[in-house]
Each structure stands twice: as C-alpha cells, then as structure tokens.
Image: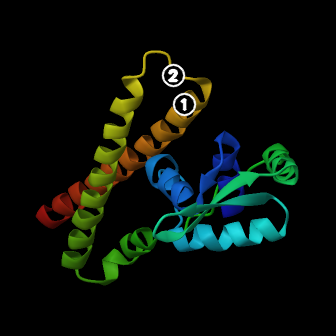
Amino acid sequence: MALSHTILAVLSQQPYSGYDISKRFEESVSCYWQASQQQIYRELGKMEQQGWVVYETLPQAGKPAKKIYSITEAGQGELARWYAAPTDPTPIREDLLVKVLAAPYVADGLLLQELHHRRQLHCKRLATYQAMEALYRAIAHPPRSEQFRYLTLRRGMRYEQDWIEWCDEVLNFLKTDCEG
C-alpha cells in the first residue's frame, strides 16, 4: 500500500486541505499508517500530477491561500484498482526484535531499559486509542463510515495491547532467567 492510497481513502470521505488530511491521519489513521505533514504534501503534489486529485484555492485573510483537495474520477479509479488487488502482510522490520535476538550476547541492562521504554510508548498509544474509542462509543447510531473507522481503531488497539503483553513476557523471562 502506498501513502497515496491512504490519502485517496481519506479524500473519498470529503475534500480536505493538506493540513486537514494530516489531522485525519493523527486522529484516525495513525493506528495503522503514519505519515508526516511534509510527506502528505509531497504525495499530494505527485497525486495531482497523476490526475488523482485536484485542488481549489481558498484565500485566507493574513495567511497563505489554502488548497482544498478533492479526489478525481481518475483517483477514484486508482483507489478501486488498488482496493481490488489482494493484500499481503507488511514485512516486519523491528529493531527491538533484533535486540532480543542478540540479547544472549550483550548486557541485559540495556534490553531491560529498552523493553520498559517500548512498553511505556505502547501503553501511551493504547491510552490515546482508548480515549478515541470512548468517543466512538458515545455515538448512538454511528454512520457506516464511522463504524469502519472504529474497526480500524480496534485493530490498532489490539496491536498496542499485544506489544504490551509481549514486552511483559520478555521482562518476566529476563526476571526469571536472572533469578534462576
């Protein structure tokens, strides 16, 4: 999957500025796809050249003009083409797993420190997602688009919870290993 497909999916909901797309990433897409504002703007430029998006310029008092991007028919076609293609799991490239693999050959203290650090990061992210989940649960009859967004949030929550549990598993192993 490319960043462009994620942006096309976001723009399928409604037109947005680059800044608003970035906010949507932070609010609802970050549990499975992350991109900086700079990456989003760069990708929007490429997508415009491909004819997948167009923008309307809105003047703003005392600020630069705002570009509001919309998906084009060609962009909808690209999203449909990509959507119809089968998916494969994303290859894992995780430094912490390599550090655990190398653990027998280096000092345990560094691994303990890193595991606590990563556990804390995943706990923080999980708490953010749980707060977002509370907002979804407060909606009595959410529209279908929000229900799908909620499902992606739930996957992100499970991802973070799994990392926390795995960090705990390794920490318990290290504790038992040191005691034994």
Is label 1 in contact with label 2 (beta carbons under 8 Å)? yes
Q: Position of residue 140 (x, y in %)?
A: 43, 16
Numbered mark located on residue 142 in the image: 2
The residues tagged by marks 1 and 2 sit, at their Cα atoms, a distance apart of 6 Å
Q: Quadrant of residue 42?
A: bottom right
Q: Is residue 88 visible?
A: no
Which residue is at the far front? 61
Closer to the camera in the image, 122 or 58: 58
Name the residue: 65% across, 48% down.
Answer: 15
Q: Kindly give the residue lying farthest to the top in the view shown.
A: 140
Q: Is residue 169 above or below residue 175?
A: above
Where's the N terminus, which quadrant? bottom right
Q: Which residue is the site of mark 1?
A: 146
Q: Which sits in the foreground, 43 or 5?
A: 43
Secondary structure found at label 2: loop
> Closer to the camera, 77 or 31?
77
